[in-house]
Image (cartoon, rainbow, N blue to C red):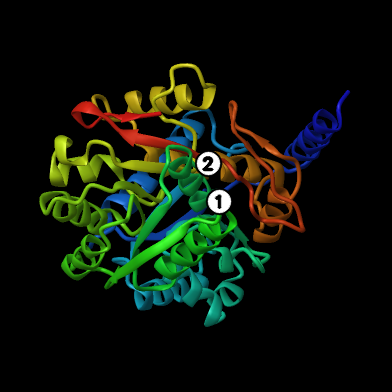
């Protein structure tokens, strides 16, 4: 028997022992998402919610977690830092004592929660954060569990792929906030390791699509062969449209925070064609991978006719990981028990492994490059 198998068996026996020794009536388990459900990243927050709810509803229909239903409540912060902080403080004081936060969005938003001590005040494990910022992980926080690779690893993949097809002169388009600055610094590091040149960089203001000045800067840098973008979906779409309309010919690459479907809807399939997007979760359209097929079937049952999305798949992973942690934590799980469960046995999710420990809360380093192809279809 392998070490991996024996750890799984021990974790299962502990959960079953606690279950059968308890005769208590078990209440629902409350989980709270704080994310943008309005504003420029509304689609991101809603798709993360959709994916997590799929996982929870599938589990609840089979009896829940050791007899308890898992209920997800989503709160809208509009991608505004001050709203994220306010809502997190309110959740921390609530009498119903949610067991975890799930699916927070934004580097600046998460940084404010940490800097202002809100994470410590709340005492809630945070499972799945939509940021790959290095300074969120090094050092990490004992209550924050990352389920996506860092922007540093994403930039490594983008620069590696671009240089492999001959690009030597690079530009960077970035959001002028902690998220974009992390992406810019990661790009500099990846380029420096390969003796490649950063010819020009240009930013835009968060929560806007004011990209014209950045387009001007990067068009003037006529030797640029590839542009990597540390930007969010709406700004990325605006940049691609304006840059291409004005004759820009560099290959364009975007980080995983971008929603391919929304980009195509905003600027059209032909204009979006050829945009490379790095992904940090497995391909949701796979017909082979068990996790992807499970997600597709759940989506088909709950939302007939709705197509899979990368962001929905990410939310599904958040939900699956938290469900398994709750099972390991036993009936009436405490926040402390959930943290301990997350740091225990690796999570095998149908071909995608998430592995935390007490020393590292970076559960996944999965990255791969996709491209928007003909008809707006996302391809590997």
Q: Quadrant of residue 279?
A: top left
What is the number of the mark on residue 35?
none
Front residue of 172/266: it is: 172
Front residue of 301/160: it is: 160
- Residue furthest top in the image: 288
Residue under the point 34% across and 31% down: 308
Q: How many marks?
A: 2
Q: Secondary structure at mark 2?
A: loop
Question: Height in image: 11 above or below 233?
Answer: above
Where residue 170 appears, x then y in whole percent?
Answer: 39, 56
Residue under the point 47% across and 26% down: 292
Q: Secondary structure at mark 1?
A: helix
- Residue furthest left in the image: 245
Where residue 67 appears, x then y in whole percent?
Answer: 59, 37
Name the residue tied to disc 2: 367
Where residue 243 appears, x then y in whole percent?
Answer: 18, 54
Name the residue tied to disc 1: 153
Say which quadrant the N terminus sits in.
top right
Front residue of 283/110: it is: 283
- Residue furthest front in the image: 223
Q: CA distance from mark 2 to mark 1?
A: 7 Å
Question: Height in image: 375 above or below 247?
Answer: above
Q: CB of mark 2 within 8 Å of CB of mark 1?
A: yes
Label 2 neighbour load within 10 Å: few <14, some 14-19, many 20+: many
């Amino acid at each position: 028997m392998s070490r991996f198998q024996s750890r799984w068996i021990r974790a299962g026996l502990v959960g079953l022992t606690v279950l059968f020794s308890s005769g208590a009536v078990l209440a629902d388990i409350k989980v709270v998402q704080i994310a943008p459900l309005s504003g420029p990243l509304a689609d991101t927050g809603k798709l993360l919610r959709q994916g997590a709810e799929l996982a929870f509803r599938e589990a609840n229909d089979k009896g829940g977690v050791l007899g308890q239903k898992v209920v997800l409540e989503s709160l809208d912060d509009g991608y505004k830092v001050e709203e994220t902080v306010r809502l997190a403080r309110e959740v921390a004081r609530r009498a119903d004592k949610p067991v975890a936060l799930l699916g927070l969005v934004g580097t600046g938003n998460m940084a404010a929660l940490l800097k202002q001590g809100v994470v410590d005040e709340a005492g809630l494990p945070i499972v799945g954060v939509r940021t790959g910022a290095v300074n969120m992980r090094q050092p990490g926080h004992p209550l924050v569990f990352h389920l996506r690779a860092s922007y540093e690893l994403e930039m490594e993949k983008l620069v590696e792929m671009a240089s492999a097809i001959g690009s030597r002169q690079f530009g960077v388009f970035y959001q002028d906030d902690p998220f974009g600055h992390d992406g810019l610094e990661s790009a500099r590091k990846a380029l420096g390791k390969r003796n490649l040149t950063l010819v020009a960089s240009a930013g835009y203001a968060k929560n806007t699509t004011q990209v014209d000045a950045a387009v001007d800067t990067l068009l003037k840098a006529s030797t640029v062969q590839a542009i990597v973008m540390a930007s969010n979906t709406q700004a990325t779409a605006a940049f691609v449209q304006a840059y291409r309309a004005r004759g820009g010919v560099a290959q364009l690459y975007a980080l995983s925070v971008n929603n391919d479907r929304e980009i195509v809807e905003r600027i059209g399939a032909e204009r979006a064609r050829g945009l490379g997007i790095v992904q940090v979760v497995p391909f949701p359209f796979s017909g082979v991978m068990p996790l992807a097929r499970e997600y597709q079937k759940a989506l088909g049952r709950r939302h007939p006719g709705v197509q899979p999305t990368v962001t929905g798949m990410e939310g599904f992973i958040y939900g699956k990981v938290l469900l398994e942690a709750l099972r390991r934590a036993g009936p009436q799980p405490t926040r402390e028990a959930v943290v301990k469960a997350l740091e225990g046995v690796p999570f095998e999710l149908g071909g995608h492994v998430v592995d935390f420990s007490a020393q590292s809360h970076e559960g996944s380093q999965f990255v791969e490059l996709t491209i928007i192809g003909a008809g707006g279809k996302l391809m590997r």
